[in-house]
Image (cartoon, rainbow, N blue to C red):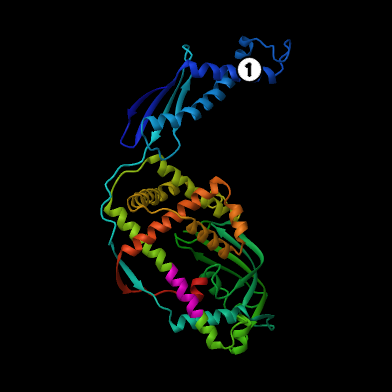
C-alpha cells in the first residue's frame, strides 16, 4: 500500500492511497466469480458466462462494490501507518481502477486538534445560594389542591374566572388567512396554567357560555411555538362550556390523599420543601457545569474540524425536527428557514465540539476513566427516571449506536464532577426565581 499525504490545513489531511494489483486482482476475481454463479443471462449457462460479457454488463457494479470493500479494509491501516487521529469518518472524494491493475482512492481526513491545555483546575465560578421560600412551598400546595379539585359544570350565567376550565372552539388567522395548524374544537383551556399563553387566557376572563369573541395577540419572537413566534394572530373563539373547580380542604386528610405514608399537612410541606430543594440543587449543578465549560473554552482557544461542527449541527437539526413532529409539524409548516436555523446553531455547535475535546484532554491528563460502577449507576438512574427495570434498560443499550453516546455522556459527567470538585466557588445571591406554579405553566 502506497500513501501520499497532503496537508490541506492543520486539521485536514488529504490521503491518496494506492493498493497494489496483488491485492486488487484477487478481490475483483472473487467478485466476478460470485456474480457468475448468481446471475442468469440469455444464451449462457449459469456459471459459464465469459469474463468480457460480465465486465460489459456488471463492470460498474462490481467496481463500486469491490472499491467500497477495499476502502473499508485499507483505510484504518493507512491511518495507523501515518499515525493520524481522525475525529469523523473520512470523505472519499474519488476512487478508480487504473489500467495497471491497482486501485486508487482519495480520503479527506479531519484529525484531532493539537493544543496545550491551559488553566483548568481551581476555576473561579459564581455560585448562587439557592433556598426554598415559604411562598414557593405554599404555591406548590395550592397547585396540588388545584389538581385534586373536582370539576363541575358552572351555573348558568357564570363568568369565566381564574382556575375555571373553559371549553372552546378557536381558529387563528394571520394576515387574514386561516392557520390550519392553529385551530381546535372542544378544547379545554385551564385558566391560570397559561398553556396557550397568558394573553390568550386573560381574554377569556369574564366571558360566559355561548359567548363568541374575536381578539388579536402579538407573540414574542422567542415564543416556544415556532408557528406563532413573532406573529400577530387574530383568534376567533366560541365558548362552548365552563367548568368550575371545587377544591378540597387543606388539612391532614389532604396530605394523606397526596402521599399515603404522610400523616399531617406539615409533613407534606416538609416533603415538598425537600423535593423543591433537590430540584434546585440539580439545576444549580447543571448551571455550574455550564459556567465551568464557558471558562474552559474562553481560556483555551483552538480551531476545530468544520466537518465535525457540521455533524453536530445536523444532530441539533434532527432533534428540532423530532420535537416538531411530536406536535404534528415540519420545518416548512412551522415557517422555519433552515439556513437561518443552521446559522443560529453554528456557535453552539462549535462550543459543544470544543467542550468535548477539552474534557477528553483533561481526562487523558488526569486519567479519568469510566468504571463498571459508573455504568451501573447510569443504568439505575435511567431505570428510576423512566420506571423501568434494570434488565429493560440494559437490553436497550445492547446496540453499539446506543451504548457509545451513553458511555460518552457518563464519561463527560465524571470529568465535570472532577472539575466541580477542583473549582473555587464564589457564593452570590440567587436571582429571583419563578414559583412552582409559574414554572409548571
Position in image of residue 76 (x %, y %): 44, 32
At 28% across and 54% down in the image, what residue appears?
Answer: 298
Quarter of the image with the N terminus is: top left
- The question of residue 320 being in magenta is answered with no
At 59% across and 57% down in the image, what residue appears?
Answer: 393
Q: Quadrant of residue 181?
A: bottom right
Residue beneath disc 1: 33
Position in image of residue 427 (x %, y %): 30, 72
Q: Would residue 263 be seen by someone viewing this image from the given angle?
A: yes
Q: Nearer the viewer, residue 23 or 288?
A: 23
Q: Would residue 441 be seen by someone viewing this image from the given angle?
A: no
At 49% across and 19% down in the image, what residue appears?
Answer: 23
Position in image of residue 154 (x %, y %): 68, 82
Which residue lies most toward the front here? 372
Position in image of residue 64 (x %, y %): 55, 23
At 37% across and 35% down in the image, what residue appears?
Answer: 84
Residue 348, compared with residue 267, is above or below; it is: above
Q: Main secondary structure of the magenta part?
A: helix
Query: What range of the chain is rendered magenta?
Result: 272-282
Q: Quadrant of residue 210?
A: bottom right
Amino acid at each position: 500500500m502506497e500513501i501520499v499525504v497532503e496537508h490541506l490545513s492543520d486539521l485536514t489531511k488529504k490521503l491518496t492511497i494506492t493498493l497494489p494489483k496483488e491485492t486488487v486482482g484477487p478481490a475483483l476475481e472473487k467478485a466476478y466469480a460470485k456474480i457468475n454463479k448468481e446471475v442468469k443471462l440469455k444464451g449462457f449457462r449459469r456459471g459459464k458466462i465469459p469474463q468480457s460479457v460480465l465486465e460489459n454488463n456488471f463492470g460498474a457494479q462490481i467496481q463500486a462494490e469491490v472499491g467500497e470493500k477495499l476502502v473499508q479494509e485499507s483505510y484504518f491501516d493507512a491511518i495507523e501507518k501515518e499515525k493520524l487521529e481522525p475525529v469523523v469518518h473520512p470523505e472519499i472524494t474519488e476512487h478508480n481502477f487504473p489500467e495497471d491493475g491497482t486501485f486508487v482512492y482519495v480520503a479527506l481526513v479531519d484529525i484531532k486538534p493539537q493544543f496545550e491545555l491551559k488553566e483548568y483546575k481551581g476555576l473561579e465560578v459564581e455560585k448562587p445560594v439557592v433556598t426554598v421560600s415559604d411562598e414557593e412551598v405554599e404555591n406548590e400546595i395550592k397547585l396540588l389542591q388545584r389538581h385534586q379539585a373536582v370539576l363541575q359544570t358552572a351555573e348558568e350565567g357564570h363568568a369565566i374566572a381564574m382556575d375555571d376550565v373553559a371549553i372552546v372552539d378557536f381558529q387563528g388567522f394571520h394576515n387574514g388567512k386561516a392557520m390550519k395548524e392553529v385551530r381546535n374544537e372542544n378544547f379545554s383551556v385551564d385558566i391560570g396554567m397559561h398553556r396557550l399563553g397568558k394573553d390568550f387566557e386573560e381574554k377569556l376572563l369574564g366571558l360566559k357560555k355561548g359567548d363568541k369573541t374575536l381578539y388579536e395577540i402579538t407573540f414574542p419572537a422567542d415564543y416556544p411555538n415556532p408557528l406563532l413566534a413573532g406573529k400577530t394572530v387574530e383568534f376567533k373563539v366560541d365558548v362552548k362550556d365552563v367548568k368550575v373547580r371545587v377544591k378540597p380542604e387543606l388539612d391532614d386528610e389532604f396530605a394523606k390523599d397526596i402521599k399515603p405514608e404522610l400523616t399531617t399537612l406539615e409533613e407534606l410541606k416538609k416533603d415538598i420543601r425537600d423535593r423543591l430543594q433537590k430540584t434546585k440543587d440539580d439545576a444549580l449543578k447543571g448551571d455550574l457545569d455550564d459556567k465551568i465549560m464557558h471558562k474552559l473554552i474562553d481560556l483555551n482557544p483552538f480551531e476545530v474540524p468544520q466537518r465535525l461542527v457540521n455533524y453536530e449541527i445536523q444532530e441539533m437539526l434532527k432533534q428540532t425536527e423530532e420535537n416538531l413532529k411530536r406536535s404534528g409539524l415540519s420545518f416548512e409548516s412551522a415557517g422555519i428557514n433552515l439556513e437561518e436555523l443552521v446559522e443560529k446553531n453554528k456557535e453552539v455547535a462549535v462550543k459543544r465540539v470544543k467542550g468535548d475535546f477539552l474534557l477528553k484532554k483533561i481526562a487523558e491528563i488526569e486519567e479519568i476513566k469510566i468504571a463498571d460502577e459508573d455504568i451501573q449507576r447510569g443504568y439505575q438512574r435511567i431505570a428510576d427516571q423512566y420506571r423501568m427495570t434494570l434488565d429493560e434498560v440494559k437490553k436497550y443499550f445492547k446496540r453499539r449506536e446506543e451504548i457509545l453516546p451513553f458511555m460518552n455522556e457518563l464519561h463527560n459527567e465524571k470529568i465535570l464532577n472532577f472539575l466541580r470538585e477542583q473549582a473555587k466557588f464564589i457564593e452570590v445571591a440567587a436571582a429571583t426565581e419563578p414559583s412552582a406554579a409559574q414554572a409548571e405553566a
